[in-house]
Amino acid sequence: MLEDELLKVGTLEGRGTNLWACKASSSSCPTGATGYTTRYIVVSGLSSINSQKFHIVMDRCQNVNLQGITISAPGNSPNTDDIYIEFSTGITVLNSQIATEDDCVSIGPSSSNLWIGCITCGPGHGVSIDSLGWTTQEARVQNVTLKMTTFKSTHNGVRIKTWAWESNRFIKGVVFEDEFVFEYAKYGRLAVCVYPTIQYPL
């Protein structure tokens, strides 16, 4: 576990090309690289390129500040979400450039007190509160603020995705504020998706 650290880092080259090709042609592939549980850290100036899987995963993290992050991967990179957050609280993402053809920021269950601002997202899927309700007893998503974001050639601006079956899931205290710039959003600025088959653009 990383704890109480200021990380000023350069470029991480994930060399994901071989794994992406394997996923495109076979169901038996290596797992790819994984991440860490962290508390009370600041990550500044990271560039993540061609990650094998998700670029940054925050799972059971507390009080993590990401600033000045640059993330990129080509359109044929499968399931390379840029920043994925679940079971975490007190996460800040600021002044970052994100482009991979997947979710720029993906927020999973039991995420709270998230502050995302001054990011450029796209191309990709936009910002997603993602696939909630997979289990019947699932922790909530609450207190999420998204501010001053530019969306470039994204599928959506902001998307809320949920499974259709019964669950105790809920979302509370989600705020979109200040200026948003949509250079292009294919399916709409806000979309609510109910799996497996229905999408309601708003």
Image (cartoon, rainbow, N blue to C red):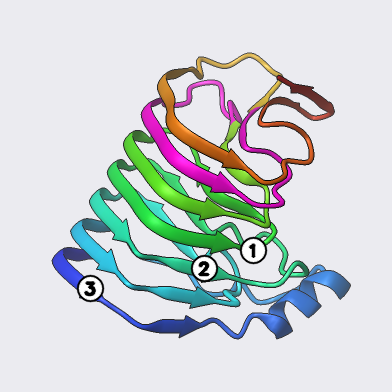
> Is residue 17 on the magenta stretch?
no
Type of the residue with mark 2? Ile
Q: CA distance from mark 1 to mark 3?
A: 23 Å
Residue 144, percent from left and from top: 38, 31
Q: Is residue 43 toward the left or the right of residue 197 in the image?
A: left
Check disc 3 and report the residue beneath it.
7
Check disc 1 and report the residue beneath it.
100
Front label number (2 vs 3): 2
The mark nearer the N terminus, 1 or 3, is 3
Q: Residue at x 37, y 73 (%)?
A: 46
The mark nearer the N terminus, 1 or 2, is 2
Q: Residue at x 36, y 51 (%)?
A: 93
Mark 1 element type: loop
Check disc 2 and report the residue beneath it.
71
Type of the residue with mark 1? Thr
The mark nearer the N terminus, 2 or 3, is 3
Q: Is residue 35 toward the left or the right of residue 18 in the image?
A: left
Residue 190 visible in rendering: yes
> Is residue 149 on the magenta stretch?
yes
Q: Is residue 5 above or below residue 157?
A: below
In this rendered view, identify the residue nearer to me: 61 or 122: 122
Q: Is residue 177 toward the left or the right of residue 190 in the image?
A: left
Instruction: Work out which quarter of the rendered image holds the C terminus and state it.
Output: top right
Q: Look at the image and give the residue range highlighted in magenta.
A: 132-161
In which image quadrant can residue 158 be found? Answer: top right
Q: Alpha-carbon neighbours of circle 2 within 10 Å: few (<14), some, or many (≥20)?
A: many
Asked whether the beta carbons under mark 1 and mark 3 sit within 8 Å of each other, the answer is no
Residue 174, percent from left and from top: 43, 23
Q: CA distance from mark 2 to mark 3?
A: 16 Å
